[in-house]
Image (cartoon, grey):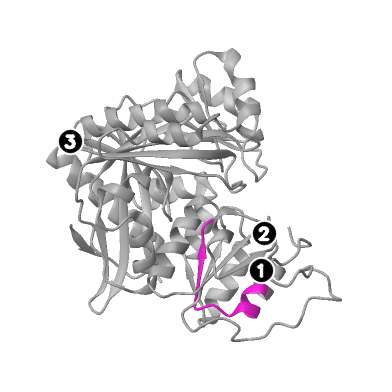
Amino acid sequence: MSDTPGPDTPDLGAPDLETGLELDDPRTDPEPVAGTSGPSAVMLLGSGELSRELALAFQRLGTEVIAVDRYADAPAHGVADRPVVAKMNDADALTALIEKENPRYVVAEAGLIAADALISVAERGAVEVFPTPRSTRLSLDREGLRRLASDELGLPTAPFWFAGSTEELTAVAQHAGYPLVVKPITSAPGEGESVLVRPDDVEPAWQRAVAAGRIPHNRVMVESVVEVDFEVTLLTVRTVGPTGPAVHFCEPIGHRQADGDVLESWQPQALAPAALDAAKSIAARIVNSLGGRGVFGVELLVRGDEVYFDNVRPRPLDSGLVTLRSQRLSEFELHARAILGLPVDTIMISPAAAEIIYAGADANPAAAPDPQAVLAEALTVAESDVALFNRPDETETRRRLAAALATAPDPIVARDRARRITAALRRLW
């Protein structure tokens, strides 16, 4: 573990699951009443599969959890102390909901959240908001985040440009040359991305990018293709204690997209000492600039001793699911502890690997004739574990079906074990 000091930067209309009332109906929506939650209650804005794990982490620390999402029966609703259905991108309604519930902490776990409401709540000072409203806004804006990283902080990145039309994208391609990667301004990692290798690719890449994500944008980011050895996630935990702010680093997590519908990750990913120092420096600078407390998934590209900043997400993420078995405290437990102001450690207890299996958001997989037999086969793999995601998760465009997890004396063996678990689980769908 390494500590580095840094500056302290400081659809409504659906029924409430508890009351059955329409939250935006003036005939039934009661006046906000302060103090309806416990003194340390946490409101999670977003109730997908990752929020479910985070809710459990908060509850194990004695914290009441209010799970909010725009649809009923979300994964975290099944474990929360109180589930609520609300349109989180309506600033007035979200502000009213927070005032009504009066939680101690508001934790944004989804992308489509009214940042204006979070800013308003945070400015009043009675409720702590995580991540900071600025982090939430920048996590939805690749252009703003990249300009912060490159222009303001001077972090190394791949050469990049922005385009607001097919004509501008064509001009960028003519200037920069091929190949190029085209990404939406806001979307989930990998969603809507294309590689341009010739002029005929420009129009399809533009259409693919602007159609991706849940927030419409007529603007794209364009990057030169940088030859790298591997990509890593450096989970970085920002805390604030009696001596001030500090950042703590988990062991680097290697990851790659396998076959389009599987995300493979493993920990640790070995880095040369110079590359590891550069990765920690980049992560500390971007995280301290964003401020707040909690886990940040800093995405980096590594080539030898050179490290490039790629992205940061101010919350637990899929590539970090491997920490459920690799670390003493998972990314969810670290996030909960940091937000509550409790001590953290990033001790890795075993090398491990994970494979996350996805399907389309509208997938309705049919169960195998004997699911128990499939699970039994998967769990015969040494040091194995599985997580099956059975509730609909509308927080992501790709639905998570399962996570295959394995530990081993080294990450190579752990990765092989995770692949064998995934091969067995495939029979479920």
Residue labelled with disc 1: 94
Vertical relation: 27 (above or below) 35: above
Q: Which of marks 1 and 3 is nearer the N terminus?
A: 1
Residue 89, numbered label: 2
- For the record, the magenta segment spans 97-109
In three-dimensional space, the C-alpha distance between marks 1 and 2, rounded to whole angstroms, equals 7 Å
In three-dimensional space, the C-alpha distance between marks 1 and 3, rounded to whole angstroms, equals 46 Å
Vertical relation: 260 (above or below) 234: above
Q: Which amino acid does label 3 sit on?
A: Asp
The crowding category of the residue bearing disc 1, from other C-alpha atoms within 10 Å (few below 14, some 14 to 19, many at least 20), is many
Asked which secondary structure carries label 2, the reply is loop
Q: Which of marks 1 and 2 is nearer the N terminus?
A: 2
Q: Circles 1 and 3: CB distance less than 8 Å? A: no
Q: Where does the image place residue 205, in percent across and percent down from the top left? A: 59, 24
Q: Is residue 17 magenta?
A: no
Residue labelled with disc 3: 410
In this orientation, which residue lies closer to the viewer: 213 or 79? 79
Q: Quadrant of the N terminus?
A: bottom left
Q: How many marks do you count on the picture?
A: 3
In this orientation, which residue lies closer to the viewer: 37 or 291? 37
Residue displayed at 68% across by 57% down: 72
Asked which secondary structure carries label 3, the reply is loop
Vertical relation: 102 (above or below) 173: below
Asked which secondary structure carries label 1, the reply is helix
Q: Circles 1 and 2: CB distance less than 8 Å? A: yes
Residue displayed at 62% across by 38% down: 361
Q: Is residue 108 magenta?
A: yes
